[in-house]
Amino acid sequence: MNDVVAALESLRTEAPSSLLPTVLADVGLADRYCMVSGPTGPLYVAWSDRGVTACVPAEIVGDDAGFAAHHPRSAVRVSAPPSQIARPLDKALATGRLGALPVDLEALGEFQRAVLEKCAEIPPGEIRPYGWIAREIGNPGAVRAVGTALGRNPIPILIPCHRVVRTDGLSRARAQRESEGEDEEA
Amino acid sequence: MTTIATSTERQLRSALARNVDAAFPDLVRELQDGIYSGALRLTGHRQDAEDVTQEAFIRAYRAMRGYDAERIRQLRLRPWVWTIALNLCRNTARRKSRKPTQGLGRDRPDPERGPEETAVSLLATEEWNRRLDQLSTPQRSAVVLRHVADLTYAEISEATGRPIGTVKADTHRGIARLRAMTEEEGTRR
């Protein structure tokens, strides 16, 4: 009898390593991500079932392990975004406008969310000072906090924090603006 | 293979009752190997076993999101998730019987193992799948849950809704039949 039991026990095996992240992504406790081509090179883009949660140039995080360390939520790599993300993402990267691309900023605080939502309204080819965002969100004294919120933008390029400058005109991200053909002095 | 210790189960229940989202990954980590191993023997297909295991956890999560803390504290996690998984295994078997996929996706060798180890383990696995296939459904479930998924008789009784005495009898008769099959095969060789 014991030989049969031992043989059955030897059939125990480990679940595939992809199982946990897939389950977590399916219930909304983890994101999915992939790499896409961006205007200045490859990007890591992550999304939840509500929208895009991260966009990071590959040159900053390096590889998948670097992205996992950078991204605050668990994420499982997939080959491509679903169509409801893929099409508007392509368009957003091509036009510099979020358009119909859903973004998920729920993990952020109310203030940072307000800053990023306002920032997303700045059209390509234009720049605004921090003070403009502070005023627009009804917090004119919070210029420094606006700078901090933009510095922690989890979705740069798509939410164009590179179009915001300090009041003295210094750039946050000159290279990104130059890729959009903007004139710093305009 | 880790057996979910009573204290671990209690801690998990408390953690889930406090915050389902925070504790759910630990529930999956704790139970996934047992559920997957058992589902693999009950379905005979890796992809089916993976689908069953994933779906069982997804359903468990959604159910727990609708439960209050007290109800979660009352859950016996392993048999509860296995109740869901067994239903999914039955659904998979029903679907397959209507739409047979001859050999497709059958429990394939693990690509991470060497060819020799793979050949041996695949042969052994296929033989046990074939033998398990010949048991009645209650015997097969009882044997797999007891000796592959490592559930106690009480947990199997809870997961299957069958009396504990019946579960023990099913397990012992199933093991006896498997033994008879291996002996018979041995004398034929």
Image: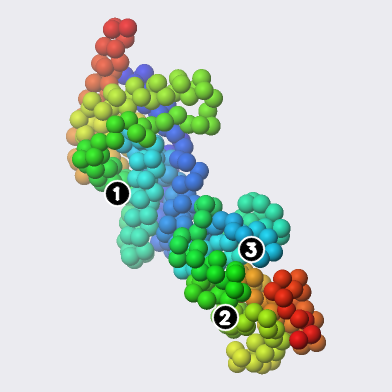
In this view, the mark in front (2 or 3)? 3
In the image, is A144 to the left or to the right of B64?
Answer: right
Above or below for B134 versus A118: above
Question: Could you tell me which chain the residue with mark 3 belongs to?
Answer: A
Whole-percent x, y for residue B151 in the image: 34, 38
Whole-percent x, y for residue A59 in the image: 71, 58
Is residue B151 visible to the viewer in this orientation of the structure?
no
Residues tagged by mark 1 and mark 3 found on one chain of the structure: no
Locate the C terminus of chain A and report the quarter of the image it occupies: bottom right
Residues tagged by mark 2 and mark 3 found on one chain of the structure: yes
Identify the residue position indicated by label 1 in the image.
Answer: B84
Is residue B182 visible to the viewer in this orientation of the structure?
yes
What is the CA distance from the residue labelled 1 to the residue labelled 2?
Answer: 42 Å
Secondary structure category for the residue under label 1: helix
In this view, the mark in front (1 or 3)? 3
Q: In which quarter of the image is residue B138?
A: top left
Identify the residue position indicated by label 3 in the image.
Answer: A38
Whole-percent x, y for residue B28 in the image: 44, 49
The one of A2 and B11 positioned closer to us in this rendering: A2
